[in-house]
Amino acid sequence: MVIAERGEEGFGAYVPDLPGCVAVGESKDETLSLIREAIELHIEAMREEGSKVPPPSSSGEYVEVGAA
């Protein structure tokens, strides 16, 4: 799962299951493209170090609330 957030000057994205795997860009599309690349590089580096790549454990949900 990737979390993408709008900031004051663009977008940021991170991967909860891969701490330290982040990307920033001017648009959401650019940021998602960059986070794909960051994930690939992050996993490649983990494998080279002999670290196990953790299985996905995060999920996202929208919930309805009464206060709007």
Image (cartoon, rainbow, N blue to C red):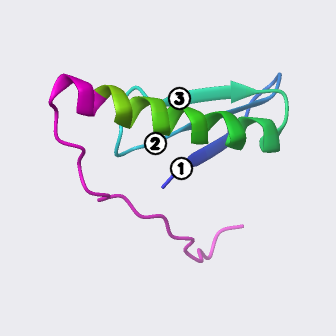
Residue at the far front in the pictured view: 48
Residue bearing mark 2: 15
The residue type indicated by label 3 comes to: Val
On screen, 2 above or below 42?
below
Whether 58 is among the magenta residues is yes
Query: What residue is drawn where x is 69% and y is 43%?
Result: 32
Residue 11 in which image quadrant: top right
Seen in the picture, residue 4 relative to 65 is either above or below; the reply is: above
x, y percent for residue 21:
45, 30
Can you say whether 63 is above or below 54 in the image?
below
Upstream in the sequence, badge 1 or badge 2? 1
Is the C-beta separation of discs 1 and 2 under 8 Å? yes
Compared across the picture, whether 15 is left or right of 35 comes to: left
Q: Which residues are the magenta region?
A: 46-68
Whichever of labels 3 and 2 marks the residue nearer the N terminus, that label is 2
For image coordinates 55% across by 74% down, the residue present is 63
Please give the residue where the numbered disc 1 appears in the rendered image. 2
Is 2 included in the stretch rendered in magenta? no
- In space, the residues marked 1 and 2 are separated at their CA atoms by 5 Å
Q: Amino acid at mark 2?
A: Val
Mark nearer the N terminus (1 vs 3): 1
Q: Position of residue 60 (x, y in %)?
A: 48, 64
| Secondary element type, mark 1 | loop
Name the residue beneath numbered marker 3: 22
Q: Secondary structure at mark 2?
A: loop
Q: Residues within 10 Å of mark 3 (few under 14, many from 20)?
A: many
Q: Nearer the viewer, residue 37 or 57?
A: 37
The amino acid pointed to by label 1 is Val
For the residues bearing labels 3 and 2, Cβ distance under 8 angstroms? yes
For the residues marked 3 and 2, what is the alpha-carbon distance in whole angstroms? 7 Å
